[in-house]
Image (cartoon, rainbow, N blue to C red):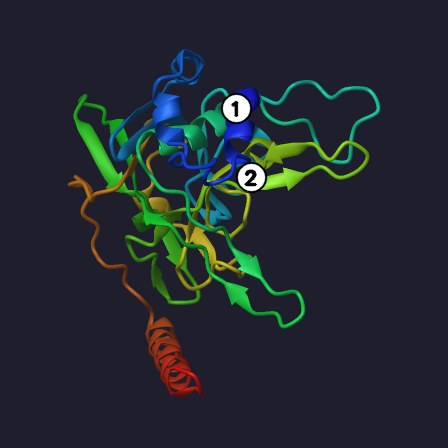
Amino acid sequence: MRTLLLPLLLLPAWAGEEAPVDIGLVLRESKEFRAKCEEFRISYEAGQVRALGRINQRGGPCEYLITVAPAKAHETIVLLDKGERPAAKEGAERRPEPLNGLAETLNNAFLAAGFKKGEALKWNEETGEVFAPSGETVHLYAEWKDEKGALRRARMSDWLWCWETIDPMRPGLYVFTGSVLIDEGPPDHKNWLGCEVDGLVAAVLSTSTAILDHREEGGLSNGAYEAIPARVPAVGTRVTCVFSRVELDATEKYEPLKLTPELEAEKKKKAEERAAREKEKALAPGK
């Protein structure tokens, strides 16, 4: 797949008087890409992508909502199928060998489904200013069958608890940034797609190599998020991850979490602090 994707990513926006290359159209017409989707059990249609996996963890700190590589699964709720890394070669390079193509194929599936690539998390090393990830909103759902064979669907943001807001993650904050290219460095300066190196699909702890990132408070704080055990299906449950441009109906309707008086007070305090920061930002020169 790298032979298909990377040359496309490196093309200029315009070639003479011709229109920009429609990468989504190129992918949809590619037999190689369709074969890769079938191999990795990924499907797409306009505005929606699906991928198969299983529940990997139900509680505790959460750095990634969805990953491909088993090496990243220690703080991941859903691990996708078939995310294997080739055996290491002798004289290992500075970075590990890329995965077997699943992450790249999934990244391409978003383009084939018509999603427009945004911008990954960035920061200014001199000033420390952080630029939040941007892109088209992607609503994340998990579908599975219960013990009676009935289809269940949950909004995956409801499975995450944020200690910065003292609340579950708000819906509608995930965006398709598209994974960045990584320069391997000297001597060859090979370019790898970041998600193929790191195996990250949907970040909770924000990172530039994930395919999807979010704009919720706490994304830059390691340990800010935890999975909510009572809301997540049992470990090992087979799930289909659904990435949708539009909101879908969910069968799982969760009651608000009950907070202790101490957490209620902390939640109120943090809300007031956020409001004060927003007011100060709005009154800053140049706004």
Vertical relation: 212 (above or below) 190: below
User: What residue do we see at 36% from left, 42% from top?
Assistant: 116
* Mark 2–mark 1 CB contact (< 8 Å): no
Toward which corner of the image does residue 148 lie, by quadrant? top left
Q: Residue furthest front?
A: 17
Is residue 240 shown to the viewer in this render?
Answer: no
Residue underneath mark 2: 74
Q: Quadrant of residue 84?
A: top right
Q: Can you give x and y, in whole percent of width and height, for residue 261 in the image?
A: 33, 75
Q: Disc 1 on helix, strand or loop?
A: loop
- Identify residue type, mark 2: His
Confirm whether residue 60 shows in the render. Answer: yes
Q: Is residue 134 above or below residue 176?
A: below
Q: Nearer the viewer, residue 36 or 147?
A: 36
Residue 64 drawn above or below residue 255 = above
Identify the amino acid type marked 1: Gly
Closer to the chain start, of discs 2 and 1, is: 2
Question: What is the number of the mark on residue 83?
Answer: 1
Judged from the image, the secondary structure of the residue bearing numbered disc 2 is helix
Could you say where residue 269 lies in the image, as x and y percent from the top left? 38, 80
